[in-house]
Image (cartoon, rainbow, N blue to C red):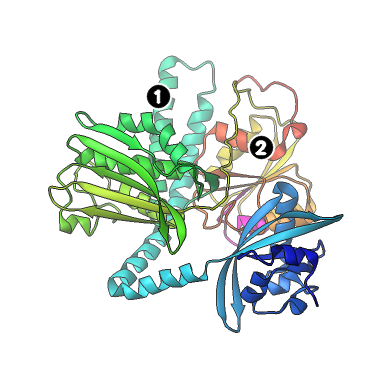
Amino acid sequence: MPPTPLAVEIDHLPVAILFVEPAGAIAAVNRAACLLLGRGRDALVGSSALAALQLTGPRWGAVGAAIARDGRIELGVALALPSGSLALQLFISRAAHETSPWLQIVVLDHTVAAQRDEARGASEGPEHAAATQRFDSLGLVAGGIAHDFNNLLVGVLAEASAAREDRTLSPAAREALRRIEAAASRMSRLTKQLLAYAGRGRFVTVRLDPDVMLADLREPLARTVHAPAILEVTPGAGSVVVEADPGLLRQVVMNLVANASDAAGQRVHVASRILLRDNAPWWQLEVSDDGAGIEPAALARIFDPFFSTKADRHGLGLSAVHGIVRRLGGDIEVDSQPGQGARFRVRLPIVPGALPVAPRPKPDTVAPPPRLIGLRLLVADDEPSVRATVRRLLERRGAVVVAVADGLEAEARLRDERFDLVVLDVTMPGRTGYDVLAFARAVLPGVPVILMSGYAPQVRGEGAEVEPDAFIEKPFTAKALDTAIDEALGPSALADEPPPAP
């Protein structure tokens, strides 16, 4: 079969490209795609894209849903071929061809990088294997602690924030509730730092310009540095884009600068630049100080959780940085000699040709939450205190709430009853929140679903085949729950009456 005119146009491109018809048949491919997949053009054109890329039906359904909603999706695929396994990243978007609504699939091969990382781990020997095992073990422990701890904090943080809405409270009572809320928030941050070290916790990545972020952080960072030391910030990478969770990348910078400030004599320097690794561009952040440096014994444990050379510190800051950077596909190293200060370098892969996502504008005023009168809501959580708190917060807005203790009971209710909104914990016995989410989509299509969790190994934006309408992280305030509900329901489903007086 001779190449189509479209295939001729894209044959010179070094990246594998496939064009797929709505039914899933491959309409055109370029030479790079044939070489990557190990099949000729005649064999690929007309065949199923699902089979060629070894995608399951549910994953392809998730692709269609994402394309309909966002116009594009990125997907990681492990492809098993006779010549070996490939680690691929698919970039799928709409591509109208004449009158046909095709999909364009651009395929990047990450196999070499994955094999390099695997080889690096093997070459580093028993110490690397022991460190990896320690990370995995701590991840399991951290996940269990975070789930239970954050469930308990829901009752503290949400109830305190809701109680502060009572306009009849005295200033002293309102201040006491504010202190309770602040203490619960600090406890939650400690748990998140432990999860970050373990490579777990909630990550929702966007494409952002890291040098713009550094410029925006200049004033907050300056407040972090203790006198007499001064802060110098010199972004030097220019306009590039990385894939990162904005809040967690800010945490990386803030933690590194706080650590440098503790050691600095006269100066803390934050700089960035572009470097090439394996012919690919990377963004490098360097945070350095002119302090006393780090002793070799301490340097070997610098990223261990709960290790600190200062008695008044919990030792989670640098370990959290290490976990966040690993999760973002980057790496971190530290270079220090006694008496010569320290230099921490963070490297993240750049997304070539991408544009940063503009942040959503914040509303000028905060309107009170709309009423939920006449709406039936299903809440499923295996922790009784969470069920009680969420029920009370929803009933204060006028909702009729049905609360159940596990996923199986939630599915039974969804099968037999009508609901306007479903709120599910992710980690439940029997059936997880993601299991019930898929069930809800099948039996009650169109009903909004919110997932909530204090620790979820799989979260929104991380490859779930079915995504919730909103995600809320435990512990949460009453306002955060209201915001998630309003996001999931949308303005058309909410009543117009003002909220009840407390």
Locate residue 310, reporting x and y percent. 19, 44
Which mark is first along the chain, 1 or 2? 1
Viewer-side residue, 232 vs 319: 232
Indicate whether 87 appears above or below 138: below
Indicate whether 163 appears above or below 471: above
Residue extending farthest to the right is 99
- Residue 366 placement, left or right of 286: right
Q: Kindly identify the residue that appears in the image at 76 percent across and 67 percent down.
A: 28
- Residue 105 placement, left or right of 304: right
Q: Does the magenta segment cover residue 425?
A: yes
Which residues are drawn in magenta? 424-436
Please, what is the three-letter code of the amino acid marked with disc 2? Answer: Glu
Quadrant of the rendered image containing residue 189: top left
Which of the numbered marks, if any, corresponds to residue 88? none
Q: Secondary structure at mark 2?
A: helix
Locate residue 122, reporting x and y percent. 36, 75
Locate residue 140, reporting x and y percent. 42, 61
- Residue 443 placement, left or right of 240: right
- Residue 493 placement, left or right of 474: right
Q: Which residue is mark 1?
A: 176
Let me know if residue 204 appears in the view.
Answer: yes
Q: Which residue is mark 2?
A: 487
Q: Kindly identify the residue that appears in the image at 70 percent across and 63 percent down.
A: 10
Location of the C terminus (image quadrant): top right
Q: Secondary structure at mark 1?
A: helix
Residue extending farthest to the left is 339
Query: How far, Cα to Cα, is label 2 from label 1?
Result: 31 Å
Please, what is the three-letter code of the amino acid marked with disc 1? Answer: Ala
Residue extending farthest to the bottom is 82
